[in-house]
Image: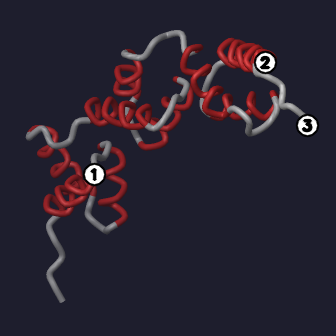
Amino acid sequence: MAPRPSCDDKAAELLARRPHFRAQLATKLAARGYPGDEVATALDRLERQGYLDDRRTAAEFVERRLARGPLGRRRLAAELVRRGAPPEAVTEALAGLPADDRAAARAAAARWRGRGGPAALARHLDRLGFGGAAIREALEGAGEEEAAAPADDPA
């Protein structure tokens, strides 16, 4: 049986697989039985060396997540917090986004087209983290698009 890797080595291995927040990494290392003082020392070292950076990880997460489709600020913030991002990293990562997410809500509504009625669309947009004003505007826009669409010929 191979010897157990040091806390430093295990932390580096986990970071090599994918970016982590400091809190995530601390939880994973503690769950593997590494003592708290070793975990703190290893994570401090990784931060000093630039391998562990909560602000960079939060910004990259937001960028990757938005590349998959539009999301509201509320959903992005919740996902960052759930993953262990500290409040200042969340604030900084979301600072680059437009304060008004109505355009993103309209884009999400356009992608949803044809999957359900207005109530289902509203629930979908709410789950994506859009605010009430953005949802109302997206619903109004979706209703206008349906009215402008040519009717199907029953013949």
| Residue labelled with disc 3 | 155
Report how many numbered discs are placed on residues in the image. Answer: 3
Measured in 3D between alpha carbons, the distance from the residue under mark 1 to the one under mark 3, in whole angstroms, is: 56 Å
Left/right placement of residue 130 relative to residue 57 reads right
Left/right placement of residue 118 relative to residue 4 reads right
Q: Quadrant of residue 145?
A: top right
| Residue labelled with disc 2 | 143
Left/right placement of residue 25 relative to residue 152 reads left
Name the residue located 28 percent from the left edge and 46 percent from the top edge: 19
In this view, which residue lies farthest toward the left? 49
Q: Badge 3, how many Cα within 10 Å: few under 14, some, many 20+?
A: few
| Residue labelled with disc 1 | 18
Q: Position of residue 112 (x, y in %)?
A: 66, 34
Q: Quadrant of residue 61?
A: top left
Of residues 27 and 55, which is closer to you in this image? 55
The reply to whether the C-beta atoms of the residues labelled 2 and 3 are less than 8 Å apart is no
